[in-house]
Image (tube, rainbow, N blue to C red):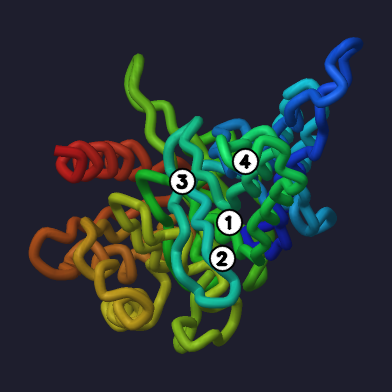
Amino acid sequence: MQFIDEARIQIAAGNGGNGCISFRREKFVPKGGPDGGNGGRGGDIVVRADRQLNTLLDFRYHRHYHAERGEHGRGKNQEGRSGEDLVLRVPCGTVIRDAQTDEVVADLTRDGEEVIVAKGGKGGRGNSEFATATNQAPRHAEPGTPGVERELRFELKLLADVGLVGFPNAGKSTLISVISAAKPKIADYPFTTLTPNLGIVRYGEDQSFTVADIPGLIEGAHEGRGLGIQFLRHIERTRVLVFLIESTSGDPKADYRTLLTELKSYKAVLGRKKKIVALTKTDIATDGQLRAVRRLTFGRGVPAVAISAVAGDGVPDLLERMWHAIRESRS
């Protein structure tokens, strides 16, 4: 299934039904009173989070949504039936914005969480509602009010415990394919990963956590360079950031600083998340490079682990550190 994390739609809630003008017509009652019923309420448009979904693809191909209108009132004081609400299902982690003002309407993060994004119109009152002692035969009724119309923008931000960040071809996709059941495209050239990947990691007998692999960053990503800002939002909700840096790099510490600067330039809060450095591809590093990376430090509270996802070296240690950081962040 194609991964789509943005969509823009037009919605219109149902109009309310009109009130009815009617008078009783009964045998031997030539001048019956008013009996026009009220119109029904227009249907609302509701957006509901559904954990079974993981893309906004449907909203790319179907962009206009209309809820059912309320039925008009009828004689004999019969009220019109209210219109059915229209429920739009989106993945958990979807942010709903007003497309015109950019105001956040809702942020749906839990399965089943929902919000009314457009209220249906009210039904108009029939003429029976206007009868008084001085006006026993009113000949007017109210029209229904129109439903709310608006344009919305959906943004999907992946919900994950761990976010993998790094330069293109740093080994993120290989790692997530080894530690989870996710099967991203893997090749020996930059920007193999063009969409985020989400994997579930089984840890221990009955524990698990989720890991998100986002496309590789380059310097200037927060300004839109490379795949840039398009995917940076997917690590906003992660509890732990794992920086994947090649052990064969000429200056791993400079690579780490560049990546951290890009994240903090995008959102300052990212710089305050728990961080782990994974020095990758040790299976192709020279002995000198291995000795050098094992001596590296990346700041207080930032552990570093040398790994080879292909050979499995260091991966259990990395998973243990991920789990420990997740538990700390949850508490």
Q: Which residue is mark 4?
A: 130
Q: Position of residue 76 (x, y in %)?
A: 79, 21
- Judging depth in this view, the residue of 11 and 7 nearest the camera is 11
138 vs 286, nearest the viewer: 138
Judging from the image, what secondary structure is the residue with disc 1 in? Answer: loop
Disc 3 marks a residue whose amino acid type is Leu
Marks 4/2: CA–CA distance: 65 Å
Give the residue number, with chain letter if any, for mark 1. 196
Residue linked to disc 3: 108
Marks 1 and 4: which is nearer the front? 4
Q: Which residue is mark 2?
A: 215
Q: Nearer the viewer, mark 2 or mark 3?
A: 3
Residue 1 on image: x %, y %: 77, 45
Q: Is residue 286 left or right of residue 86?
A: left
If you read the primary sequence from the N terminus, does the residue marked by circle 4 or circle 2 appear first? Answer: 4
Dots 1 and 4: beta carbons under 8 Å? no
- Residue type at mark 2: give it: Pro
Place residue 136 in its image quadrant. top right
Q: Residues within 10 Å of mark 4 (few under 14, many from 20)?
A: some
Measured Cα–Cα span from mark 4 to mark 3: 43 Å
